[in-house]
Image (cartoon, rainbow, N blue to C red):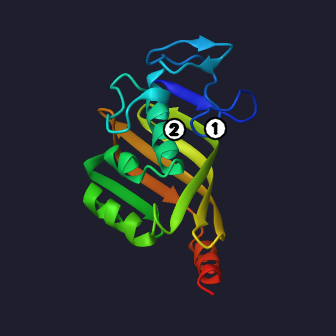
Amino acid sequence: MTTEIVSDNAWPRSPMSGAMTAICPRPRMGGSQVDGTPQETDRRFATPHHRRPAMSATPTEIAETFIAHWNANRVEEALAMLSDDVLYDNVPYPNITGRHNVRKFHLDFGMGTDFRADWKIVNIAAVGNVVLNERVDAFHHSSGSVISLPVMGTITVEDGMITVWRDYFDPAEIKRQLAEIKR
């Protein structure tokens, strides 16, 4: 079992997510680096959005790409990274099963239309195929208001696809901030 820990305390930030990129070198997916900066040939940064992550991508790289798609308002590309039968456990709300149902949940919430994601990874670590990510999720509303929530999440990756997406947050805080937007 491989353990990969990424921490804001020691390494440069990833251009993908604002998170730390590595505690030790990870396998590259192609391309090269100049002074530690990924070049355009690095597929993590230049892959066409319709393509799924390469099978050689680590679970951490897949999680970072997933968050980067949300942050770039590429909702469909983010959703395409989910397995057909994904479990979305948005604690404390009821579980949602299946990519189609996860898409409906997020579109009904207004992701990509009324809301734009700006999710900052504070810390990220992986053990095997499970990625833990501590984040501060900001949701920018079309009115100019912003909802900001501390989140702890897990993403489970199997065969290059996200099979479990679980986020923990304070539901009272999002409810309070949503009420302020609707005024």
Q: What residue type is labelled 1?
A: Ala
Q: In which quarter of the image is the N terminus?
A: top left
Which residue sits at x=45%, y=69%? 110
For residue 182, above or below residue 31: below
Label disc, if present, on residue 64 of the rendered structure? 2
Position of 87 compared to 174: left or right? left
For residue 112, above or below residue 82: below
Q: Residue furthest bottom?
A: 183
x and y percent of residue 72 in the render? 52, 47
x and y percent of residue 97 in the render? 28, 60
Q: Which amino acid does label 2 sit on?
A: Glu
Which residue sits at x=32%, y=34%? 51
x and y percent of residue 80 in the render? 32, 46
For residue 173, above or below residue 6: below
x and y percent of residue 16 in the render? 57, 36
Give the class, few, some or many, for how many residues have Cα within 10 Å of label 1's Cα (few <14, many ≥20).
Answer: many
Q: Name the residue under label 1.
A: 19
Question: Gap between marks 2 and 1, in whole Å?
Answer: 8 Å
